[in-house]
Amino acid sequence: MAKILVAMSGGVDSSVAAALLQAQGHTVSGAYMKNWINEENIVGNCPWQRDIEDAAAVADRLGLPFRVVNLMREYRERVVRYLLAGYESGVTPNPDVMCNREIKFGVLLDYALAQGFDFVATGHYARKAADGETFDLFEGADQNKDQSYFLALLRQEQIARALFPVGALPKPEVRRLAEQFALTTAAKKDSQGICFIGEVKMSDFLKKFIPDKPGAIVNLDGQRLGEHRGLHLYTLGQRKGIRVPSNTPNAAYVVLEKRVADNALVIGFDRPDTPKLYATECTVSGLSFTNHPLTVNAELEAKPRYRSRRQRVTFTPSAGNTARLKFHQPQRALSPGQVCALYDGEKLLGGGIFMEIIYRL
């Protein structure tokens, strides 16, 4: 039996993860990662106090030791700084993926090992399986809840010390088990917010740290159509909130480019023939592999964003820990800075960061 520290968020998934590990006979302790307390009074719901209370109540119900681990400084340095730097430079970063690599299975894992624990467990919907002396990660059995995408940048040494007790279960079964274990989180609504910050709109969060920098909204011909408040408040492929009427029946504007050079937001009609909207190829940088590195050309699948289905790609590695991806089908609004997860069927191979997007003619 192992000594396991469960990262308990105050939600039902990590609560059930702790209960299952205890039922299997392991020595289990719970820990809440205190990453953010909304000091800046950002508009939105940042329920860290309620989450700590819920996590503590579950630990008490199960008779588990419980602790709050203060990682606020590390979270600011490794996640918030990365997030803000990305938006300031005109790209769209992914704080949830970075939180998993740098905080949950980074700083918290280091803390756990120093405290004598063998593993860190979370409530992620992902599966881990041995591959000889190493380990592979797979999509969660519940395709509607699969969270393997958010683990794409984990390294093998992190995966070896990670456990995902609910990864093989459908969500309704997790709820049922929470009721069976009489956990107070059984009916708690799932969080939809930024990793361990809370249910805060990204635009509201960014406003507290990045000043507005108004500029022109233009079309592909360079015609000025309006004014934006700052490029960091928009994402590629965005339709709502542009505040420029198309004046064209059955046609809406979409964000095509955030042009940092002249601080221009480029928009066009949301349709397949619009330039700079659909891409067939891209380069990814910062490649990270969960187990065996890919060093040769291969036919794989990729998820260009969390809710995407796996897309067939041709993978061509290149120098400098980068690769070229050629999608078999054009992809809408690929965004520099976002994470692209790589798969072989349900097996997660790793991932990288979108760098250059190559649009079809």
Image: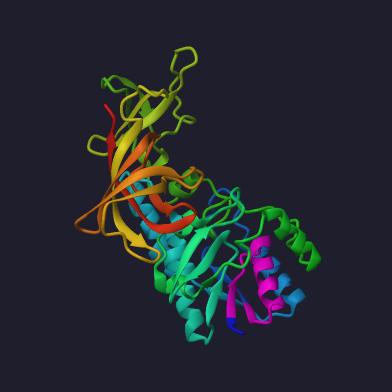
Across and down, in percent, residue 77 comes to 39, 65
State the extent of the magenta-drawn residues as a range.
4-29
Q: Residue furthest front?
A: 132
Q: Nearer the viewer, residue 304 or 345?
A: 345
Q: Residue furthest bottom?
A: 116
Can residue 338 be seen here? The reply is no
Tell me what residue is drawn at x 37 percent, y 59 percent: 81
Across and down, in percent, residue 172 comes to 72, 54
The stretch drawn in magenta includes residue 20:
yes
| Quadrant of residue 326 within the rendered picture | top left
The stretch drawn in magenta includes residue 164:
no
Across and down, in percent, residue 294 comes to 31, 59
Number of labels in the image equals: 0
Q: Residue furthest left?
A: 319
Q: Nearer the viewer, residue 323 or 72?
A: 323
Work out which quarter of the rendered image holds the C terminus and state it: top left
- Horizontal side of residue 277 vs 139, given as left or right: left
Tell me what residue is drawn at x 41 percent, y 38 percent: 234
- Vertical placement of residue 216 versus 176, above or below: above
Work out which quarter of the rendered image holds the N terminus and state it: bottom right
Across and down, in percent, residue 342 comes to 40, 53
Q: How is the image coloured?
A: rainbow
Can residue 237 be seen here? The reply is yes
- Vertical placement of residue 269 versus 203, above or below: above
Q: Nearer the viewer, residue 176 or 193?
A: 176
